[in-house]
Amino acid sequence: MPGRPAHHREHGFANLNPGFERPGFWTVQAFRLRRVWAALFGGRPAPAFPRVANDGRALRENRGEATLTWVGHATLL
């Protein structure tokens, strides 16, 4: 598609890694079975991370220390 990166396609994303191979049928089924089994019969409990209210002023004024801010589902800044 003109003007877009090579991995962008009309109907989605294409993996350009020449070594990439799609997993076989049984590999996919085993993955799905493990996910269903873990969802139904447990697994490791999620870790309990401390929660602190966002202090926007402190984040804006901080110029020297590294910070980690959870924005949502799978996003960290």
Image: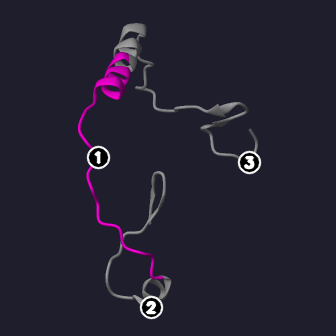
Q: List x then y, in percent, for residue 74.
A: 45, 51
Identify the disc placed on residue 3.
3
Q: Earlier in the sequence, mark 1 or mark 2?
A: 1
User: Is 38 above or below relative to 77?
Assistant: above
Packing grade of label 1 (10 A; few <14, some 14-19, many >=20) is: few
Task: Report the side of 22 relative to 50 (left or right).
Answer: right
Q: Quadrant of residue 6?
A: top right
CA–CA distance in space, label 1 to label 3? 42 Å
Task: Residue at 25%, 42% (x, y): give it.
Answer: 45
Tell me, yes or no, whether the highlighted magenta stretch contains residue 49.
yes
**Quadrant of the snapshot with the N terminus:** top right
Amino acid type, residue under disc 2 in the picture: Glu
Q: How is the image coloured?
A: one colour
Q: Secondary structure at mark 2?
A: helix
Q: Nearer the viewer, residue 68 or 8?
A: 68
Q: Secondary structure at mark 3?
A: loop
Q: Earlier in the sequence, mark 3 or mark 2?
A: 3
Packing grade of label 2 (10 A; few <14, some 14-19, many >=20) is: few
User: Is 53 above or below relative to 70?
Assistant: below
CA–CA distance in space, label 1 to label 2? 32 Å
Identify the disc placed on residue 46.
1
User: Which residue in the structure is indicated by mark 2?
Assistant: 61
Q: Earlier in the sequence, mark 1 or mark 3?
A: 3
Packing grade of label 3 (10 A; few <14, some 14-19, many >=20) is: few
Q: Which residues are magenta?
A: 33-55
User: Is 54 above or below relative to 41?
Assistant: below
Tell me, yes or no, whether the highlighted magenta stretch contains residue 76.
no
**Comparing labels 3 and 2, the label whose residue is closer to the camera:** 2
